[in-house]
Amino acid sequence: MNMSKDDGNTMNRGGSLDVERLFEAARDEGALSPEAMQALHITDLGAQIQAGFGVHVDDVASSEVVLVTVMPDDSGSIKFAGNAGAVRDGHNLVIDALADSGQRDSILAHNRYLNGSVLYPYCPIAQAVKMDAKNYNPALGTPLYDQAVVLLGTVIAKAQEFAQSGVPARTVTLIISDGADAGSTWARARDVCALVRDMRRSEAHIVAAIGIDDGSTDFRAVFRDMGIEDRWILTPKSDAADVRKAFALFSRSAVRASQGGASFSRTAAGGFGG
């Protein structure tokens, strides 16, 4: 990442966050392994990651935060299978559940579609944009590994930004796909796995996945290769009701995880069944 640096903070001369310095700080603290650092530097991700950063730490009053991050699949197969409405409804269900929870003031949300468009950067849950037919028209490909690295890099960097400001951050991330990787040009499953492995080790992150059945993909194998644990993988049928049920399970898990340290740890250990 070719970003200019100044001394003493994590801002570059243009006033935007220096993502590289955040990653270096995480590495120095032992939160990022050499393999994860390599994954984050296969290509220059700075601008893509900054697009998701949103609200500044100084504008968040809570003494701790939970970052809830979702990556809905916007590939054409979602629409062809008739699941676009179910994915929209599922995302909106998650947002409503978190906005209605007692912890809503400490929850920030971010939505980056699987092909890289940002619906909304990190913002208070009450400001999260609902998905609808105008802002979600799945018609693209499935660069699953490339965009998973971007997404997880954003989560790691944003959590590090809060940590460096003395605000503990826990994260809950959901990746949604209805097919195996098709279109990644620079990342592989092992690169995603390096990031997920480090995130799991820190015990401050949950990474979950929903694989909507396409009739041929072994989603448990795909997501395992990406480092995601079985207990955090759901494989609903290509059916609107089943897809919505999977999102409902995730929303309950995200609400539990947002309730504090012990509850987060229990949720992380229990998975969707916990």
Image (cartoon, rainbow, N blue to C red):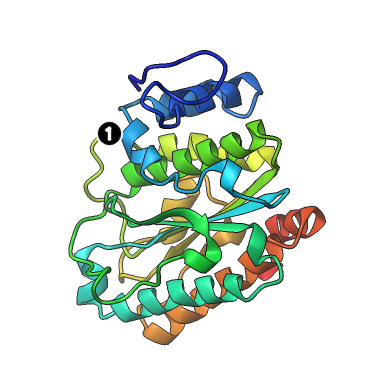
| Location of residue 200 by image quarter | top right
Q: Which residue is mark 1?
A: 186
Viewer-closest of 46 and 125: 125
The residue that appears at 55% across and 22% down in the rendered structure is 9
Q: Can residue 71 be seen?
A: yes
The residue that appears at 43% across and 16% down in the rendered structure is 5
Q: Position of residue 197 (x, y in %)?
A: 57, 38
On screen, residue 3 above or below 82: above
Is 47 situated left or right of 76 in this image?
Answer: right
On screen, residue 79 above or below 264: below
Identify the image quadrant of the N terminus.
Answer: top left
Q: Position of residue 189 (x, y in %)?
A: 39, 41
Q: Position of residue 156 (x, y in %)?
A: 53, 38
Q: Amino acid at mark 1?
A: Trp
Residue at the limit of the structure toward the right, as seen here = 262
Residue at the limit of the structure toward the top, as seen here = 7
Viewer-closest of 219 and 192: 192
Q: Can residue 69 be seen?
A: no
| Location of residue 68 by image quarter | bottom right
The residue that appears at 67% across and 69% down in the rendered structure is 273
Numbered circles on residues, count: 1
Count neighbours of disc 1 (C-alpha within 10 A) and say few if under 14, some if 14 to 19, many if 20 or more.
few
Viewer-closest of 197 and 28: 28
Q: Position of residue 144 (x, y in %)?
A: 33, 50
The residue that appears at 58% across and 72% down in the rendered structure is 99
On screen, residue 265 above or below 24: below
SS for dot 1? loop
Identify the image quadrant of the C terminus.
Answer: bottom right
